[in-house]
Image (cartoon, rainbow, N blue to C red):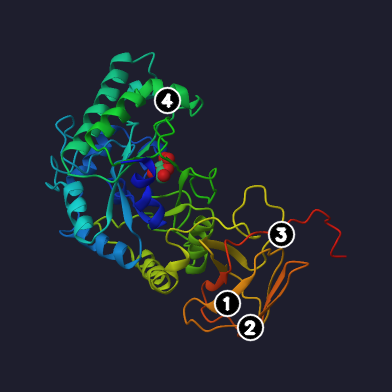
Amino acid sequence: MDNKERLRWFHESRFGIYIHYGLYSLLERGEWSMYSERIPPKEYALLAGRFLPQPGCAVQWADTIARAGAKYAVLTTRHHDGFCLFDSKFSKFSTTQSAAGRDLVAEYVTALRRAGLKVGLYYSLLDWRFPGYFAPEKFPESRDALVEQVHAQVRELMSNYGSIDLLEYDGGWDAKAKTARESWIAFWRSRELNAMVRSLQPQIIINNRSGSEEDIDTPEQMVKASATGRCWESCMTIGDSVGWGYVRHNPNFKTVPQLLQNLCTAAQGEGNLLLNIGPEPDGRIRPEEQQRLLAIGAWLKENGESIRSSQRCELIGSSVVGEVDLNLQGGWTRKDNVGYWQIFRWPGTVATQILVDTPVRKVSLLTSGEEFPFEQNPDTGKLKIFNLPVNPPSPYVNVLRVEFSECPRRKAEPDLAAWL
Ligand code: GLC
């Protein structure tokens, strides 16, 4: 399978859901609690005695994810605390060998496949329980044991759950977060690790957080396009940026328009949004997240054409790196000769796009197909769309579908003062 083919589903999807769920969910203060509060491993491990995910929680996840219009998900199979949601021969600190008595990864994989979703697994390389992680020189045996465990457990994940579509590492950095990526690769023996993964799962997509670039870049908490041709995915929380795991008192949930704008901005730069949920201690998706995901799903049903398999568009407002010009309304995605103007801030009855070099054939509202008259000045490149409703048809993002006679091009503007 060539690379383009292998990465195709990822490009088509544009939208996935991250799930941070583990023992930390019980503490209700986010997934970094163990380290940030320096909870000794022995004390932290007691949480495993009361970690009891509701039966069928993975089915609820899969159902909500599908209804949100996401095409894949990524579950924390183990986070930095080392607790595994899967059965491992190399650690007793897992859901199968504690109160839950279940392999949650198996349940998740089955539920996702049934819902027709692609399966992603997150795995943290670092494990806070190992002194050899924090002081590798001082505790070389612990360091070696940690790296051995990583290789053995990744092998388990790649061997025991059928075909896996996506592997997302995390925690490749050293404890002081000071070293360059090359040294992460040396520490985790990442090249060997990824070669093993690819030999077991030839179709898999791997992220860049083992230090090695692999297939996808993963900007965090911001939407930032990678170089053209490079796959990328922005991951983001729905609530505050600190706290991917459940945070009971989470004061800053993003609004549906904010979330949709992030999704659109990612699509404008040919990238994906991996939107995170942090299920409640018993595994249920909290209502604040559930409602937002369903609203996104309803929007995607009508406007998904402007998101799925989106391509970059040259027109102003297209996540072009180094852009000085602003698109006051929003931005553009494209599919071949069709441009999609994703409007975040409705302009009123007339919408103006400057520097359009390609003849327009037709302008319509994506949701209804209603057509609007337009005027184009071939000398200046100004495109004006008339008779739009005074108020935005949808309170979220509205999409104008603009058919061009060929791939839309931006008009060059050699003389910046020419319009004066
Ligand atoms: C960071 C954090 C982590 C979170 C992740 C999401 O690396 O350490 O808690 O899981 O980003 O991508």
Residue at the spot of label 3:
411
The amino acid sitting under disc 4 is Trp
Identified by mark 1, the residue type is Val
Q: Which of marks 1 and 4 is nearer the N terminus?
A: 4
Tell me the amino acid under the disc marked 3: Lys
Does label 2 or label 3 sit earlier along the sequence?
A: 2
Left or right placement of residue 211 versus residue 91 in this view: right
Q: Is residue 93 visible?
A: no
Provide residue 90's location: percent of width, then percent of height.
17, 29
> What residue is drawn where x is 54% and y is 78%?
364
Residue at 42% over, 67% down: 304
CA separation, marks 1 and 4?
A: 51 Å
Residue located beneath label 4 in the image: 184
Dot 2 amino acid type:
Pro
Packing grade of label 2 (10 A; few <14, some 14-19, many >=20) is: few
For marks 4 and 3, give the CA distance. Answer: 45 Å
Q: Dot 3 surroundings within 10 Å: few (below 14), some, or many (20 or more)?
A: some
Question: How many numbered tags mark residues here?
Answer: 4
Q: Where's residue 129, x and y in %?
A: 30, 29
180 or 280: nearer the eye? Answer: 180
Q: Which structural element holds mark 3?
A: loop
Real-space Cα distance between discs 2 and 1? 7 Å
Q: Which of marks 4 and 2 is nearer the N terminus?
A: 4
- Which residue in the protein does label 2 denote? 373
Q: Is mark 4 on a helix, strand or loop?
A: helix
State the mark number for residue 322: none
